Amino acid sequence: MLWSAGTDRIRLGLSACLLGRKVRYDGGHKLDRFIVQTLGRYVELVPVGLGVPREAMRLTGDPQAPRLVTILTGLDHTDRLLTWARHRAAALAREALWGFIFKSNSPSCGLEGVKVYPGRGRPVKKGIGLFARVFRKHFPLLPVVDDSRLHDPELRENFI
């Protein structure tokens, strides 16, 4: 069987904000109409998101092992998010996913080119979101893409 029992559609995980859910730090969303209205007609979308409200966060330090720190108060949530990400990835293993669509540039979900702020100076776009890093390690063979790449016809076709 190519997809999960009880459904005739392939299941794709995705960052919940792309579905229009208000799970961003500011209570907003990043609804992607292509994903929801076009791709959503052919696949079952399984949303994943953090709780709200929460303070805005960013990656800091070494791009190879960044820390997730709140912008205003400087609280480090790295260990907490990594623990959550490991548990969520384990739970997603039971969801029979065939791929995942991540939110680009997100400190939790960005697949590449996420800003990492060093101690001083300008940020570098060399980071990977913490959840995205854990997810890819847990599911090394699962196709993944970020939302920005789905708007390029060749990259979209490659993912699909």
Image: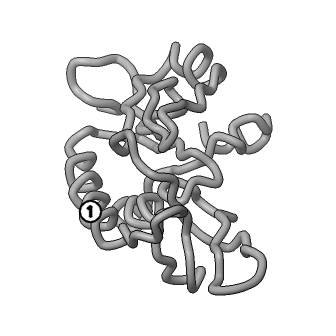
Measuring 46% from the left and 23% from the top, which residue is drawn there? 43
User: Number of marks in the image?
Assistant: 1
Measuring 42% from the left and 27% from the top, which residue is drawn there? 45
Q: How is the image coloured?
A: one colour
**75 to the left or right of 156:** left
Q: Quadrant of the C terminus?
A: top right
Measuring 53% from the left and 31% from the top, which residue is drawn there? 28
What x and y, as percent, mark residue 139?
37, 59
* Quadrant assignment, res 2: top left
Residue toward you, 60 or 31: 60
Residue toward you, 147 or 130: 130
* Quadrant assignment, res 135: bottom left
Measuring 29% from the left and 18% from the top, which residue is drawn there? 7
Q: Secondary structure at mark 1?
A: helix
Above or below, 48 against 142 in this view is above
What x and y, as percent, mark residue 37?
59, 14
Q: Which residue is mark 1?
A: 86
Residue toward you, 23 or 72: 72
Above or below, 55 against 61 in this view is above
Q: Kindly identify the amino acid type of the residue bearing the numbered disc 1.
A: Arg
What x and y, as percent, mark residue 71?
54, 63
Above or below, 25 against 87 in this view is above
What x and y, as percent, mark residue 35?
59, 25
**147 to the left or right of 45:** right
Instruction: Count residues near mark 1 (Cα–Cα under 10 Å), then give few for <14, some for 14-19, many for 20+.
Output: some
Q: Which residue is the extreme one toward the front?
A: 73
Residue toward you, 11 or 2: 11
Q: Quadrant of the N terminus?
A: top left
**76 to the left or right of 110:** left
